[in-house]
Amino acid sequence: MAEDVYKALADPTRRLILDELAERDGQTLFELCTRLVTRHGLGLSRQGISQHLAVLEAAELVRVRRQGRYKFHDLNTEPLEHIVTRWLRPDAPESTP
Amino acid sequence: MAEDVYKALADPTRRLILDELAERDGQTLFELCTRLVTRHGLGLSRQGISQHLAVLEAAELVRVRRQGRYKFHDLNTEPLEHIVTRWLRPDAPESTP
DNA sequence: ACCATAGGCAAGCAGCGACTTGCCTATCAA
DNA sequence: TTGATAGGCAAGTCGCTGCTTGCCTATGGT
């Protein structure tokens, strides 16, 4: 659902995960765990991050590709486009010739 | 705070309020009440909408101008710009010459 | 002065969501 | 095959938040 995007972005930890993936795509769950702890100092269980990734995946903000026993996560910014254009007024300066 | 924008957008009722204001700026609380009920069919108390407006106002998505006993609400889309550009990758096609 | 309208404050309830803990499955290396 | 690594499932706790109800303030009309 496209409506899940707003819910997915509501949590600050999920936004940090998106930040991490924006910086380096294709990270696995454990990579994200260690980087979130060491770089952002948040103490969170592995399961907590896994659940956050599930939400981001449901919102299609994160795409997943499996390979062996690894599961790589890629950022997908496409759903973000719609959430701004929804409320852009028709009086936008660049749309008026 | 800019972080409040995500929280403000998380609720579907608040998004409807933004829709209403995008269509017609400068509505008062009672106007929004009646229009949300009649046009979108959601049964919500006046106080509920008032609290939603407080959240939107804190996120600076809605600006307020008082006049007599009336309080008019205007949409402000400016905070929306940042929430997309935050995760836009540097590999954007239009930025590469 | 009176009453109706427009809005605000505060307490209370109920449900969702974030997080943990414990256990289970699957893949790779030795 | 055994053990270690990568990840998943399910139940349970706890706090936040959306919503209601009741009462209060202030402005405007008559």
Image (spheres, coloured by chain):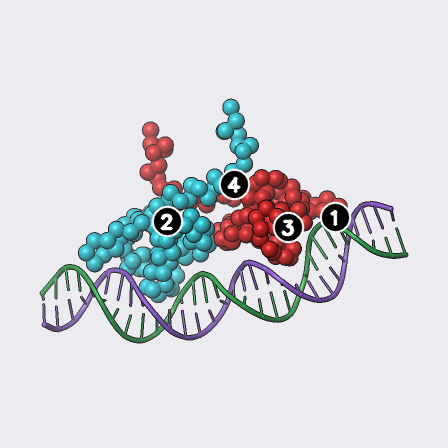
Chain colours: A cyan, B red, C green, D purple
Residue B94 seen in the current view: yes
- Tag shown at residue B33: 3
Give how far across and how far down residue A20 sits, in percent.
Answer: 35, 51
Q: Amino acid at mark 4?
A: Trp
Residue B3 seen in the current view: no
Residue drawn where x is 55% and y is 52% of the image: B13
Q: B77 or B50: which is nearer to us? A: B50
Q: Are marks 2 and 1 in contact (CB under 8 Å)?
A: no
- Tag shown at residue A60: none
Q: Amino acid at mark 1?
A: Arg
Q: Amino acid at mark 3?
A: Cys
- Tag shown at residue A87: 4
Q: Amino acid at mark 2?
A: Leu
Q: Are marks 3 and 1 in contact (CB under 8 Å)?
A: no
Determine whether the residue tagged by mark 4 lies in a helix, strand or loop.
loop
- Left or right, A79 with respect to A93, comes to left
Instruction: Quickly name the residue at label 1.
Output: B69
Q: Is residue B80 above or below residue B47?
A: above
